[in-house]
Amino acid sequence: MATASGGGSEFVDKFPDEAAIIKASFLIAFVSLGIGAFFGLIQALHRTNVLRVIDSADYYTVLTGHGVLLAIVFTIFFLCGVFHWAVARSLDRPAESALFSWAWVGLMTTGTVLATVAILGGLVPNLGMSADVLFTFYAPLQAHPIFYIGLAMFIVGTWLAGADWFLSYRAWRQEHSDERIPLQTFMVLTTMIMWYISTLGVAVSVVFFLIPWSLGLIESVNPLLTRTLFWYFGHPIVYFWLMPAYLLWYTVLPKLAGGRLFSDPLARVVFVLFLLLSTPVGIHHQYLDPGIAEGFKFIAMTNTMFLLLPSLLTAFTVVASVEHGARQRGGEGYLRWLGALPWRDPAFTGMALAGAMFAAGGFSGMINAGMNINYLIHNTLWVPGHFHLTVGTAVALTMMAGSYWLVPQVTGRKLYSRPIGLLQVIMWFVGMVFMSNAMHRAGLAGIPRRTAEPQYQNFEFLTPIGSIFELRVQIALGGTLLFLSVVLFLFNILLTSLGEESDRPVDSYLPEPLSGPEGSPRILDNLTMWTGIAAVLVVLAYTLPLAGIIQNGGGLFGGGLPVPATVSAGVDLVLTTVTSAFNTLWGVVA
Amino acid sequence: MAVDSTAEGAASSAARASTDGGVPANADSQGDSGQTDPPVDSIVGTADDGIVRELEHDDFDPVGTLVLVLIYMAILIGMWVFMYFVEFLGRGLTVVG
Amino acid sequence: MEIHAYEKLWLALALVLIVGFIGTITYGAAGAGIEMIDDKGGTVDPATLDQHPKFGDPGIERTGENSYDVYVVARQFVFEPGTTEPLRVPAGSTVTFHVTAADVIHGFEVVGTNANTMAIPGQVSEFTVQFEEAGEYGMLCNEYCGSGHHVMEGKIVVMEQGEFDSWYEQQQAQGEAEN
């Protein structure tokens, strides 16, 4: 579908309702990105002892905000925007009900606000409301009930978003009974099925244990059980972050490079593999946990190692597609063709740098996946070093670069400045090189993650090359560059959306792949079957370990007393409100 | 069919074979009506304006990709061996029971 | 389904790499004898830890000619033993740690080494390591456990066997005197 040069046929013209939803999703995503990035700056300067403007106790409040706003709110709202765009575009039809779409946006936003209020409450002294529990909220640390309630609402909102896209697909299917699922929609549907399977674990933990516990309705929870249910979800969430980035790398990056997708069938295979393998691996975050037998850890490890395969396949297909673009633009030779790529285009360069950085992040992830080598790096700064390369760059930088191409399509306005966009993505890459490499080396020295002041009395950290001081400087410098990069990004997007409408705001044409779906077995599109297999793999990986934890660990609710991270003065108020509201309703109904 | 179908793209793609694909400033004057122009022309995604030849499925062998991924594989193997045998096994207090 | 020859080569190499990783880990387990933390430490009731026969008075006890058990309780924001007084072990000994937490989840890391585990209320992490030469190690908590997480540290002192024996006898004597 080519863009005409007379204007009026951008996404926002064809699908105005969907464009409005996408704009709302992106707005919330970008606001969260800004706050989260600011918190990250505070952390980078604080833990390196370069500049401390808050109490160290408040560091953990800021860190919770950083994790939740960036790894949950920013990434997932952006995913919702991209997926809503991709479904409408690839099926060439609007959503079934704009009202329903606004409902999930509203539910997700409400949940976000509740959880964020609970978190920020930790910065206000004597408020009695806080959620200093970090992104992982491990019991028996306890947050205010509205933290958990907000998260639950957010997750339910994402379930409704998935339903929105499945409804579109079902309506399309009725009119196209024999066709292959268009690739972008295929990616959306497989990602959402994976999400439904994986959020089950955290939903059970939050709804049946953490919410009632934080309200005082049950006395205690089994900490290993809720932690295991978290990680059941906590690994697949990384694929929920990655798969929208992969959607952009497979279906948009080739065009940005001047080429075409090398293989549609392989892209489908990759997404099916993620659907199957993302969830039955969560125990690799618990290699050093007591209460889980080594055999279950070994199974999680082998599943995890095979989960490398779809990413390694992606490396080939995406690079081949980019190479195709380079050669179409006149590139020659074994490596010289890299010079023929459109490096001045921030959307291209951002995604290319993100992909290159992912190659490095993939390696540190391979180390994390190694069951016994995990002793070396568990809970050290190596782990954030790893995930700032993956979610922090492969995903976040791709999302920012993709925004330079998508925001014009949903606003009808040109990007305010390509050069500033280019500076922004390069600055992100450079900042991350400094910060992440230093974090990896610091982790090997034993410096812990999630720690406000990793400077201790009893001992010194040692590093074979360089010095601890130089590692701290790199982290502070890198963190500062990353923050400035976000400022440039937000500035550029803001001015773009305030600009004048344009007849040709962006080149949004997407060419056909070199190898289309017709060459691939139809069984790839059999979503029901893949869902069934994925469920079986999850049951196999988790039934016995969970049974062991429940039977041997003191039952569903554990045996010990809970220790709230802070005392919630608001609990009684909530309880009274809820019970009196219920009594009122009952009085009306009965 | 892969080439951008706007008039300026088709006409000048050959001439701009070695550029980065940015649309030159004069093209920007079409269609804008009295706006304050952003600092430099800002159309994102114009790499296909720089296409000089179309490569179909059978014309293309991703040999450059093969070179890059083989280099990557070599780095992975080297780094893994170093990390496992030097950093990890070379360290004290390994858990043996 | 048609897959380009180069991509087939890459797929094969990727599978070899994956098998190679699994193989290395297995070598570490079977060859180098590395064991994972698992469920053999059993469970405890975190609410009554002070009355537990071992965790009620955490410390080191001799179990054989060159082997010892060390019981460690992690709580906000100290290791018992380790923080107020260092944890002492003899050089050249085989020590089995039993680590649990009294209140929230903590981490137990011996800095610069491969000794690393989670301390989870209700569960006991049991693991064995060999201490070689005399010297000192730092300990720290590497799992966020509350507002004082960053002050939670300790020390392990590895003593020459002779010095350790005299210290140990003194501890036993004091313990009996107190009972």
Image: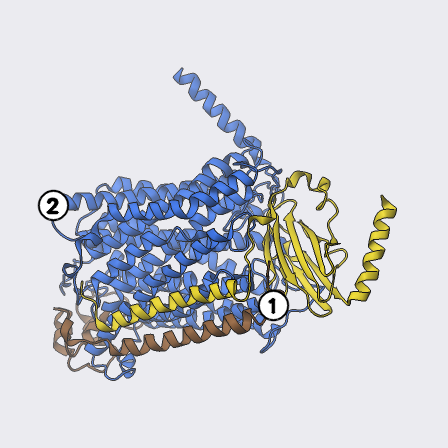
Chain colours: A blue, B brown, C yellow
User: Disc number at residue A50?
Assistant: 1
Q: If the image is split into quadrants, where does the C terminus of chain A sit?
A: top left
- Taking depth in this image into account, of A116 and A502 the one nearest to the observer is A116
The chain ID associated with circle 2 is: A
- Taking depth in this image into account, of A189 and C69 the one nearest to the observer is C69
Tell me which corner region of the image, top left, top right, bottom left or bottom right, holds residue A406: bottom left
The chain ID associated with circle 1 is: A
Residue on which disc 2 sits: A175
In the picture, measured across the screen, residue A210 lies left or right of residue C141, that is left
Q: If the image is split into quadrants, where does the N terminus of chain A sit?
A: bottom left
- Residue at 42% across, 51% down: A72
In the picture, measured across the screen, residue A178 lies left or right of residue C87, that is left
Secondary element under disc 1, as helix, strand or loop, is loop
Tell me which corner region of the image, top left, top right, bottom left or bottom right, holds residue A242: bottom left
Q: Can residue A55 be seen at all in this image of the molecule?
A: no
| Rendered position, C81 above or below A250 | above
Tell me where residue C87 appears, x and y as whole percent: 73, 58
State the CA–CA distance, disc 2 to disc 1.
Answer: 62 Å
Determine whether label 2 and label 1 are within 8 Å by CB. Answer: no
- Taking depth in this image into account, of A294 and C104 the one nearest to the observer is A294
- Residue at 26% across, 70% down: C7
The amino acid on which the numbered mark 2 sits, given as a three-letter code, is: Glu
Q: Residues within 10 Å of mark 2 (few under 14, many from 20)?
A: few
